[in-house]
Amino acid sequence: VSALQLTRRALPGAAAAATAIGTQNALAAAKPVLVLGANGGTGLECVKYLQKKGRPCVAATRTGEFVGDASKLVTVAKGDVTDAASLASLITEQTGAVIFAASASRQADAKKTSNAKAVDNVGLVNCAKLCIEKSVPRLVVVSSGGVSKPSSAVYIFLNLAANGIMDAKIAGEDAVRKLYAAPGLAEKNVGYTVVRPGGLLRDPGLGVSAVELNQGDTKSGRINRADVAAICIESLDSKAAFDTTFECYYADTAKGLDDVMKSSAAAVG
C-alpha cells in the first residue's frame, strides 16, 4: 500500500498529524485489533494474517463462536454490528484498530435485522462514530469495487443479487468519509481506510506482486480474500492509506467495470 501515492484529505495540520501517526501506530500495535465479521471469508483471513504478524486481535462474531484456530493472540467475542450497544461494548479506548468485515446474515431468521442496510450502512456508521469517540487510530472498511458506479454492470448485478447491498455500501462509505472530515478531527490522528476489492475468491494469496491498487473506481477484477486481508492489515500502519479509498484486484484480471462480470463468472463458473 505504501508504494502507491494514494489521495488523502487535505486538512490544516495534516503534516503534523502524519508525523504523529507513526508514534500513535506504535502504541496502537500493542492494543488488540477488533475484527468485526470474523467468521466471514475476509474477516477470517484478517484474523489469520494478524496471527502471522504476532498481533493480538479480538475476533467478533454474531454468535460469539469462532470457526478459526485457537490462539493466545485471539480473543473471541460476541458482537453484532446492527446492535449499537453491542458495538459500544467492543470498541473502547483499548482498541488498537477496527476492521469492518461484517456482512448481512444469510440465515432466514436473521435477515429482518441483519440486512445490507442495517450492516453496511447503519452498522458501519455507528462503528465509525464509536471509533472517533474512542480515538481508535484506524478504521478499515471492506467495501466493494464498482460501488460508486451505479450504472455499471457490477453494481447493478450485485445490488439485485444481494438485496440492495451496493446502495447500502456506498451510503455507508459516504457517511464515513463525511464523519472523518469533521473539523479538528485530524489533530486526533484518527483516520479511516476504505478497501474496495474486486470479485472475491478463496484460493491462497498470490502476494503483493500480483496486486494492482487503483483509485477512481474505473477498473476491477478478481482477488483472493487472503490478499484482501493482507491489504487491510498492512493499511493499519500505512500513512499512505490514512483517510483514503482505493480499489484492489489482480493486475492480470483488470478490466473495465462493464467487462469484469464476464471474467468473474468464468473464474467461478
Image (spheres, rainbow, N blue to C red):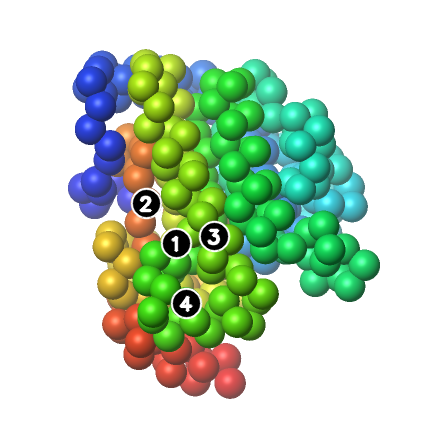
Is residue 226 visible in this depiction of the protein? no
Structural crowding at the residue carrying mark 2, measured as other residues with C-alpha within 10 Å and reported as few (<14), some (14–19) or many (≥20): many
Marks 2/1 in contact by CB < 8 Å: the verdict is: yes
Task: Identify the residue position indicated by label 1 in the image.
Answer: 196
Picture quarter with the N terminus: top left
Marks 1/3 in contact by CB < 8 Å: the verdict is: no
**Residue 245: mark:** 2
User: Whole-Å distance between the Cαs marked 2 and 1?
Assistant: 8 Å
Element marked by disc 1? strand
Left or right of 182 in this view: 71 = right
**Residue 54's x, y, as percent?**
53, 34
Depth check, mark 2 against mark 3: the one in front is 3
Q: Earlier in the sequence, mark 2 or mark 3?
A: 3
Task: Identify the residue position indicated by label 4 in the image.
Answer: 155
Residue shown at the point (34%, 71%) measured from the top left: 152
Task: Identify the residue position indicated by label 3 in the image.
Answer: 169
Residue shown at the point (69%, 57%) measured from the top left: 105
Is residue 137 visible in this depiction of the protein? yes
User: Whole-Å distance between the Cαs marked 3 and 4?
Assistant: 11 Å
